[in-house]
Image (spheres, rainbow, N blue to C red):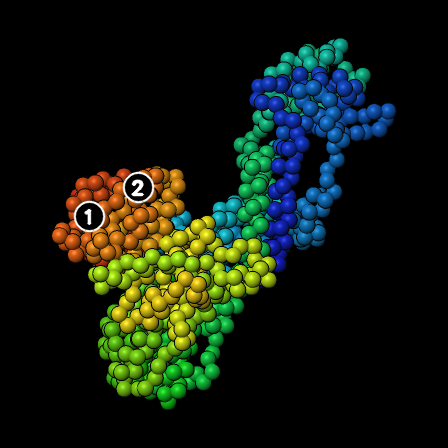
Amino acid sequence: MLRRLHGLPGLFAALFLITLAITGAILALAPAIDRAAAVVPAAGEVSVAELAGRVVAHYPGTEQIARNPSGGVIVYYSHDGQPGADLVDPSTGEGIAPYEPSAFFTWIKDLHRSFLLDDPGRMLAGVMAAVMLLICISGIFLLLRRTGGWRALFRPLAGSGGKRLHAELARFAVLGLLLSALTGSYLSAQRFGLLPEPVAPGPMFPAEVSGGQPAPVSTLSALANVDLTELRELVFPYPDDPQDVYSLTTSGGSGFVDQATGELLKFQPRPAASVFQQWIISLHTGEGLWWLGLILGAAALTVPVLSLTGITLWWQRRRSSGQLPDNAAGSEAEAIILVGSEGNTTWGFARALHTSLNKAGFRVHCSEMNALAEHYPHASMLFVLTSTYGDGDAPASARQFMARLGDFRPGERLKYAVLGFGDRQFPNFCQYAREVDTALAGKGLRRMHHVELIDRSCTTRFREWGNKLSELTGTPFSLAYDPLPPPTLKLELVERADYGLAVQAPTSILRFKVSQQGRRRRLLSRARKALPTFEAGDLLGVMPPQGQDARIYSLASSATDGILEICVRKQQGGLCSGYLHGLKPGDQIDGFIRHNPGFRPATGNTPVILIGAGAGIGPLTGFIRKNTERNPMYLYWGGRSSQSDFLYQPELGRYLEDNRLTGLNTAFSRSEERAYVQDKLRQDEIAVRQMIKAGAQILVCGGRNMASGVKQVIEEILQPLAIDVETLRAEGRYLEDVY
């Protein structure tokens, strides 16, 4: 429901909203342009009396002096019977340039306020402001659901492509868009009588004035008591009429000034409703707050991109959740596939399963989890493939599943298997899939296979899951699906450093550059750089020979280093690791970059504790290399032998010398000490606890068993602080990249 409230109004109103946004961004420049053209003395430097005296000296026919919200002073005068208006310098009274409202900005303002359609257009613009308000509010709640709450709203976002761009831009612009939409809706509601509009009648013209000889305007006491920053308008009396008066309007109110005595007459303060109204106008237009205008303009410029990415995501979601070929009716199907997806990735895996089961001779029905039927009379197998949204929530196509499950009547033969998709960087990895598995078991269904969890759409795990199901069901089928990877680069090995042969743990540091062939191809596409943008901790996908699935390795370098560096341990029987270890300088591979923003050290001077073992040291060393600001950074790392597989030993020594690395603590399991990285953490328990108490962030990289042991030790260290690892994880202070 929330997604529909967010998406459908945006789809129908996109063109109007883009028009409002672009014209609003242009209008937001006006206050800054006015400010740049004006001379603005400091508060207390020039009084209205001084200003008026200086202006009259240069413009004897002065009729009115006005100060615009951006601080510019404008004089309206008559010369030889011809009216004129100039922007003046208040410190001298001299003219800066003729003043005339911009015809271009006037036309843009009319387009923004009414689409050039007068009152019907103004009403339409007001409706669009309300639509934008609805989109902003629903968008905030969707962002909170995706990130896992207010505390996680400003952490790095997972994902890539249009979906991530949409979320990143929304996070940047939502407050500015919300302010514009809220104030615009308020002003439109006032114009059409839905809200009261403040009435501020001016003071009554004074019944009596002195009628004496007019004094020089620069000597009038009432004007001398008003600072220029408070002036809004000063209207001069009619020439040669001693009964006329000056009309003065300030930020605090309005009144009259006797032109002979300088006395302030009939002054009336501005009512609070009028002050509030002016603030609403300033917050909407940026008038008087030129810097806010630029912020609102920048936020408005995101609307065309947000509209395009939003429409694209809607279309992808609609297309991906559409009917599949050979999709049997639920009442006739022998196998049921239910899909929970926030985007379209999970549907691709569901299609692969649907195709394989069809080829194996089954009648298969596939639909979203929200479409769970009350009964599937002929089905013997139920497959649930679901992602998890944000911090453990149901994805869009599964939000009604739990409610519908209450009315579900499973047949006696029906068995089920749940496959969860997620990202281990999120605290509640595949939490919704776990909940679905538990709920189905609670309905009395029997498991065909225990719940399987897939990290970052790993195609290998998907294929292994299919093989296991084929074995359990006695049905020969195989699953093969690979989401379209990013375009590959041709990479050339330029350097390698080998370790660990003596302890049967061959590990190599491999450094690649884009090959000349790849560089020529990129030049032909007018790419400016040979390498794409990436940071240490991002991922390099390597395409093994014989068309196997890509293998993912954490990068130990950043694009600014000019190389792609990975640290790879050769696994027994490992196809890709064996392939990489067999490379010689000059050999080429195909690879692609996958960003991993959820695994980054925090910026600032709070301590960062890096923990790893084996090849997990790669990205950690990359973080240290980039620590050019010398913020406190400590590394705990475990290997087998200091003589054989002390990875990055020369580099770490240099980083200690130049203070990019504050402290290094190593553990070697095949040394006399026979220590593991967990042991070193226990030895430094007090220091580690003090750093965590001071706000330290912990990053763990390496094998799953090591990461599990480290987590247990950190839990022990945290006990006196009355917090746990999950608390740190929720705060973005405990990050893992494990395999």
Where 661 sits versus 6, above or below?
Answer: above
Secondary structure under badge 1?
helix
All told, the count of numbered labels is 2
Instruction: Return the residue found at the far right.
Output: 80
Of the 4 image quadrants, the one containing the N terminus is bottom left
- Residue located beneath label 1 in the image: 681
In whole angstroms, how far apart are the C-alphas of marks 1 and 2?
A: 19 Å
Q: Nearer the viewer, residue 394 or 267?
A: 394
Lateral position of residue 163 relative to residue 187, left or right? left
Q: Say if residue 193 shows up in the picture.
A: no
Q: Residues within 10 Å of mark 1 (few under 14, many from 20)?
A: many
Q: Residues within 10 Å of mark 2 (few under 14, many from 20)?
A: some
- Residue located beneath label 2 in the image: 656
The structure residue drawn at horizontal position 56% and vertical position 37%, both measured from the top left corner, is 291
Image location of residue 391, percent across then percent down: 34, 57
Identify residue type, mark 1.
Leu
Tell me which label, 1 or 2, sits earlier in the chain: 2
Q: Say if residue 129 shows up in the picture.
A: yes
